Image: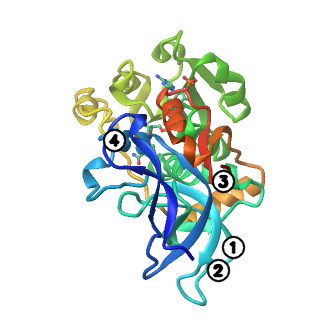
Amino acid sequence: MSETMRAVVVNEFGGPEVLRLGEVPMPKVVNSDTLVRVHAAGLNPIDVKTRAGKGASGAIERMPWVPGGEFAGVVEKASYELAPFQPGDEVYGMLLTPRYQGAHGDYVSVPFMSLAHKPKSLTMLEAGGVPLAALTAWAAVVEAARVHSGQRMLVHAGAGGVGHFAVQLAAFYGADVVTTASGRNHDWLTDLGASQVIDYTSERFEEAIDEPVDVVIDLIGNVQDNTGSRSLEVLRDGGLVVNVPTGSWPTMHEETEAAGRELRASTLKLSPEGRILTTIAQLFDQGDLQTHLDASFPLSQARAAHEQLEQGHTRGKIVFDLTAE
Ligand SMILES: NC(=O)c1ccc[n+]([C@@H]2O[C@H](COP(=O)([O-])OP(=O)(O)OC[C@H]3O[C@@H](n4cnc5c(N)ncnc54)[C@H](OP(=O)(O)O)[C@@H]3O)[C@@H](O)[C@H]2O)c1
């Protein structure tokens, strides 16, 4: 096996033009790591924010940095003979980059606890865009919000990578789901299980919602139209707001406290847990979860992929196809 591999590399922070297709050393396989040949790898806002010098950029100790927090592929080398994922297995998983070299390259070395068998019903390309986004939706909807039947939940940005999984998970576990999206996504989100879809481009969601909600999953924060702060208006007394984009609503705790209605507020961080990806794979394979591939790019078109994601209107996921030239 060669000592180097292809990867999208960032040598300096900046706009999409800093992205290069380069050669980097093969990732090292130590301890419980499994070496996976990447077939497809999703692009997420954290990749774009970090490339721009925000996001997780403060944790990058040396350049070049290889972005990419999720992937699907085939195991090349197991960590030991009886390890749960063996050469030839089709897997998908999540990587904590920049602690690990990212997935926008030919191989990743990843702890096997962050892997699961790929859902059989998904192509490699579809599966490559699932792990980080679906684990975030799971952490918000299932773990933080304790989703249950009869609960009313508002999901902001239901059409995005995290949002389309959040809407489906909330509906699957029995919640009454309200979501926000531009008009072109309404029929699709209704099909995914939302009972009400509000066009944030033409309506104020706090005016369109006539019955208070128990939970708001806020995937926007105050970076657009004070979406976070305005969300407090639609929460019932004692309700919960989960603000997902890090740093997007710095005054959340003060504002919820000042509302004087025993509101609860939490930010969110996700863990790359393979056991949850196994449950998520089951949901796909039994037909209770679906994903939407908005666009795919070869690694050589990383710049175009970042530019598209940065426009902020991805429906579902953008994924790199590592089998394409
Ligand atoms: N804390 C964590 O661990 C963590 C993990 C994952 C993600 N995140 C963050 O969570 C956020 C969402 O991630 P993502 O992957 O879902 O992003 P994404 O896929 O890029 O989201 C795009 C979607 O946002 C919708 N949108 C844009 N502006 C909106 C608005 N004002 N109101 C409602 N919808 C709006 C768009 O819908 P239309 O096209 O219909 O406008 C589009 O479908 C990002 O900021 C990301 O960094 C945090």
For the residues marked 3 and 1, what is the alpha-carbon distance in whole angstroms? 14 Å
Three-letter code, disc 4: Thr
Classed neighbour count for the residue bearing mark 1: other residues with Cα under 10 Å, few (<14), some (14–19), many (≥20):
some
* Residue depicted at 55% across the width and 88% down the height: 80
Q: Which residue is mark 3?
A: 127
Residue 217, horizontal then vertical, whole percent = 47, 36
**Image quadrant where residue 37 sits:** bottom right
Q: Nearer the viewer, mark 2 or mark 4?
A: 2
Q: Which residue is mark 2?
A: 86
User: Alpha carbon of mark 1 to alpha carbon of mark 2: how far?
Assistant: 6 Å
Q: Which residue is mark 4?
A: 246
Q: Secondary structure at mark 3?
A: helix
Q: On the image, numbered disc 1 is attached to which residue? A: 89
| Residue ID at (61%, 46%) | 298
Q: Tell me how the rendering is colored.
A: rainbow
Q: How far is mark 2 from mark 4, CA to CA?
A: 36 Å
Q: Is residue 157 above or below residue 280?
A: above
Three-letter code, disc 1: Asp
**Amino acid at the residue labelled 3:** Ala
Whole-percent x, y for residue 106 in the image: 56, 61
